[in-house]
Amino acid sequence: MPGDHAYRTVTAHELATVWPRATLVDVRSREEHATAYVPGSLNIPLGELTSRLADLPGGTLYLMCGSGKRSSQAARILTDRGYTTANVAGGITEWYRAGHPVAYQPIPENPSRQQPGHAPAGLRSLLHKLFHRNTA
């Protein structure tokens, strides 16, 4: 197993079968997490992961980011340190597309354009921006 980054990859639907009982670690930036996040997720940005190992509970850690790239890096880092991990394929983007709950804070840049009751469209737009920024 040395050198073998043996972490699992799960789909959003597979995560949904254990959420919210599972430990979900969101490795996106604080700003990204504050804007849109899975309720109950623990935000530890990828760059802080190795310095915050003490913040991680035991058991399987489900790792999520915007699209799955940063969370797969986190899975390798943690698996190498003896943690049991599962990378969520497609990240929060796929979680949202699959119809699972996402909490979010509206972006305050355009308060005049935000209307009550139009959250899903705003969230779709935000996730679209996050997804395309992370894959570019």
Image (cartoon, rainbow, N blue to C red):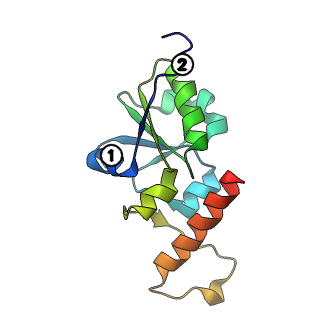
In this view, 20 is above or below 1: below
Crowdedness of circle 1 by 10 Å Cα count: few (<14), some, many (20+)? few
Crowdedness of circle 2 by 10 Å Cα count: few (<14), some, many (20+)? some
In this view, 21 is above or below 80: below
Number of labelled discs? 2
Q: Amino acid at mark 2?
A: Asp
Which residue sits at x=60%, y=33%? 73
**Residue 92 x, y percent position in the rendering:** 49, 55
Secondary structure found at label 2: helix
Which residue sits at x=61%, y=58%? 131
Which residue sits at x=47%, y=17%? 82
Task: Choose top left, top right, bottom left or bottom right for residue 132.
Answer: bottom right
Tell me the quadrant of the picture where the C terminus can be found. Answer: bottom right
**Residue 76 x, y percent position in the rendering:** 55, 27
Secondary structure found at label 1: helix
**Residue 134 x, y percent position in the rendering:** 67, 53
**Residue 75 x, y percent position in the rendering:** 52, 31
Residue situated furthest right in the rendering: 136
The residue lying toward the viewer, choosing from 109 and 120, is 120
Position of 116 with respect to 129 (left or right) is: left
The residue lying toward the viewer, choosing from 74 and 104, is 74
Label 2 to label 1, Cα distance in Å?
23 Å
Mark positioned earlier in the residue sequence (2 or 1): 1
The residue that mark 1 highlights is 14
Residue situated furthest top in the rendering: 2
Q: Amino acid at mark 1?
A: Glu
CB-based contact (under 8 Å), mark 2 and mark 1: no
Of the two numbered discs 2 and 1 in the rendering, the one whose residue sits closer to the viewer: 1
Residue 126: numbered disc = none
Which residue sits at x=39%, y=61%? 98
The residue that mark 2 highlights is 80
